[in-house]
Image: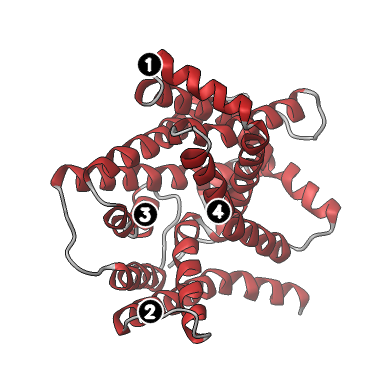
Amino acid sequence: MELPAAKSPAVAATAAQAAPDRIHLASLKLPSWLVALVASAVYLTGGPTLILVNNQLLKNQGFPYPIALSAGGVIFTAVFSQLAIRLRLVGDRPIDRPGFFVGNALPIAVLSALTLALGNAAYVHLTVATCQILKTLTPALTLAVLYVLQVEIPSGREAACVVLITCGTAVATTGGGLALVPLGVTLQILANLAEAIRIVLSQRLVLNMSLLQVGYHVAPTQAACLLLAAATLELRDPTDRAAAAASIWAHSTSFFVACTLGYALQGATMLVVRYFGSVAVKLLGQARNAALVLSEVSRGNQKASAQQLLGYSISLGAFCSYVWLRQRPKIAAERAKTA
């Protein structure tokens, strides 16, 4: 059975630290379901928009450095949260606990850099399509990490939904022969695992702290690790560094938009993790793709094979079931309060 959030040891031990975030939401008189809905909408729309902006910068504006580009939104988050807390613009305060940095901020930061570095390395050995298919394993890996780290104990029904979503997406996206180079597959699986551990650790953190506190403690180290990875893998040559600086200067508006979107997406992601769990974040993108394909097919704008229709239908149906299973206890609790 799934453990209620209130009974989680990590949450119970630091419940007082989450109070500032609850006070902010309460002062705005926003119901939790509305916050969750808006966060999900920003996550679903912001992700593709950021991909388009980043793609423009990477391919058309002379900045072919994806790890360095990914650091932009994290740097924006770090600067904003540091200023907000240090200048006392909000009620949140830094967490002053021995070992907090080593046990929380540093692992998340290192795993973020590993995810990007390993993922980029996998693209050298595999096709984009193969990498995307292998990424469908990430929700299942996230579910396993949740259980191993005891952050949350998923129910059997939730686990079955995740397996169905993963299988459905794999069925829909698999076509023709796949060039499975062993080294490339290993790199992509390791990237998936690093991402799964990162998002689970983020869930544990965001349940105990406000979003600004998470950004205050994690984002600076995360940005430093990403910049170190970029300097090691992408910007080793002075010519590359000069070209990157020139591109940033020449297209400063586009970079500012990308950084702002990255910041908004990070905040939305943490809110989705808080309200729906870390697995849901990994599933939302797959469900969005399935819904878009089925919608376009139903309107006659796109053709799809029977295999694709079957796979996407399974994936979308299982996702709806997963969300319902996650929210059913909360809905019951809300009804009990108003009864």
Numbered mark located on residue 47 in the image: 4
Residue 89 quadrant: top right
Q: Residue at x 65, y 31 (%)?
A: 252
User: Looking at numbered disc 4 in the image, what kind of residue is underneath it?
Assistant: Gly
Q: Give whichever of 155, 252 is nearer the camera.
A: 252
Residue occupied by mark 1: 237
Mark 3 crowd level (few <14, some 14–19, many ≥20, 10 Å Cα): some
Give the percent coordinates (x, y) of residue 38. 69, 61
What amino acid is at disc 2?
Ile
Cα gap from disc 2 to disc 4, whole angstroms: 23 Å
Image quadrant in which the N terminus is located: bottom left
Mark nearer the viewer, 3 or 4: 4
Quick check: 254 above or below 293? above
Disc on the earlier residue, 3 or 1: 3
Badge 4 or badge 1: first in the primary sequence: 4
Residue that numbered label 3 is attached to: 147
